[in-house]
């Protein structure tokens, strides 16, 4: 059994919110269609600080704690680099020709997926592009990093899930036609060779990465699955959907454990676009088209 309690409902954005990022401890960042990046502190949740503004919609952000560096990906394919230790206008670098959909940091590099079908690799020190791979001619959506940090899984709108070798920055293989429509998100199981995928067909699937075989399919939502994450204690899988719900699943069996919706829990009024789990806590954060961020306490009974 799982107990769910909403402890905060935060407002401040003027458009849909697409990205959440942990800043430190009880602090986090949000960004969205208004071009704002807001900083929140759960010890003072009534106040949010605008730390960056751009003249475009923001679909993705990443935060490098070591360098205190915020990277923003915009709808036009630009990357904005913001040094949070200095109050300067962000540097904007243009390589991609279409929307930036995901940004992930691994070691000293930033990995970027775009609507132009390219995966790019950037230096966090120089803010310069190092390499790129044309994986598809359709949108590349989410990036998932394998537990051993040797492989990137790239979900794509061509229905494929691509695997890229981190050291060589080269294509390894792919799961072909993994879903009926676009794959929006994937996440590795933290301790075995399973990867979970979700997409526009509203199906939740698990795959054996070693054998490249489908293990299980669950009709998880009514509409698109926008995001998949696992809980901080690695016990649960959590999905966010355009059907306005958040669902919590047993990581091993994919048994549905809890549905967080508007009627029972005062959940979101629109599509749920992103999720993060605050480190070393039982707090799940969700956000979406209704311009709100909700903070949930999730606990086993």
Image (cartoon, rainbow, N blue to C red):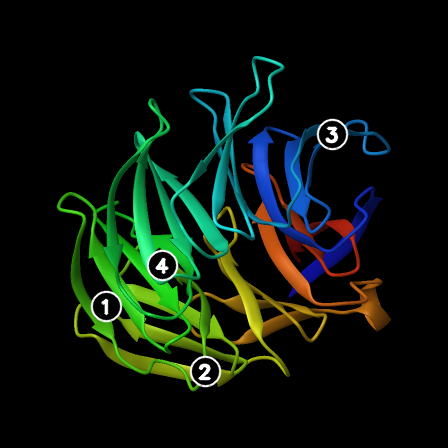
The alpha-carbon separation of the residues under discs 1 and 4 comes to 9 Å
For label 2, the residue is: 181
Above or below, 229 against 121 in this view is below
Give coordinates of residue 126: x percent, y percent: 33, 23
Residue appearing at x 37%, y 28% in the figure: 127
35 left or right of 256?
A: right
The quadrant in which residue 134 appears is bottom left
- The quadrant of the rendering that contains the N terminus is bottom right
Circle 2: element type: loop
Q: Which of marks 1 and 2 is nearer the N terminus?
A: 2
Is 202 or 71 nearer to us in this picture?
71
Label 1 vs 3, first from the N-terminus: 3
Marks 2 and 1: in contact by CB < 8 Å?
no
Kindly identify which residue carries mark 3: 50
* Distance between the alpha carbons at the discs numbered 2 and 4: 20 Å
- Measured from the top left, where is residue 57 in percent x and y? 64, 50
Q: For mark 3, give the secondary structure.
A: strand
- Which residue in the structure is indicated by mark 4? 188
- Name the front one of labels 1 and 2: 2
Real-space Cα distance between discs 2 and 3? Answer: 36 Å
Q: Name the mark on residue 209.
A: 1
Q: Which residue is drawn at 37% across and 55% down?
A: 144
Return the x and y of residue 276 as percentages of the image width and height.
58, 48
């Amino acid at each position: 059994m799982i107990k769910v309690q909403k402890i905060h409902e935060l407002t401040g954005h003027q458009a849909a919110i697409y990205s959440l990022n942990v800043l430190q401890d009880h602090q986090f960042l949000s960004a969205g269609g208004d071009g704002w990046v807001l900083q929140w502190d759960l010890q003072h949740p009534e106040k949010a600080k605008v730390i960056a503004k751009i003249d475009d919609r923001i679909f993705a952000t990443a935060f490098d704690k070591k360098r205190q560096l915020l990277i923003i990906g915009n709808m036009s394919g630009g990357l904005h680099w913001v040094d949070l230790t200095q109050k300067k206008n962000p540097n904007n670098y243009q390589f991609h020709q279409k929307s930036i959909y995901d940004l992930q940091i691994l070691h000293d590099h930033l990995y970027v997926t775009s609507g132009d079908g390219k995966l790019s690799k950037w230096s966090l020190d120089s803010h310069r592009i190092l390499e790129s791979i044309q994986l598809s001619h359709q949108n590349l959506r989410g990036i998932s990093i394998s537990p051993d940090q040797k492989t990137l899984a790239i979900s794509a709108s061509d229905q494929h899930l691509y695997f890229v070798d981190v050291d060589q920055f080269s294509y390894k293989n792919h799961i072909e036609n993994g879903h009926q429509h676009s794959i929006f998100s994937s996440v590795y199981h933290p301790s075995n060779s399973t990867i979970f995928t979700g997409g526009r067909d509203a199906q939740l699937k698990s795959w054996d990465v070693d054998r490249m075989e489908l293990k299980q399919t669950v009709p998880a939502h009514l509409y698109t699955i926008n995001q998949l994450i696992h809980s901080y204690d690695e016990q649960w899988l959590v999905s966010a959907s355009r059907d306005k719900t958040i669902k919590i699943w047993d990581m091993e069996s994919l048994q549905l454990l809890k549905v967080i919706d508007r009627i029972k829990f005062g959940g979101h009024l629109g599509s749920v676009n992103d999720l993060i789990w605050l480190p070393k806590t039982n707090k799940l954060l969700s956000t979406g088209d209704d311009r709100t961020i909700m903070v949930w306490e999730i606990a086993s009974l």
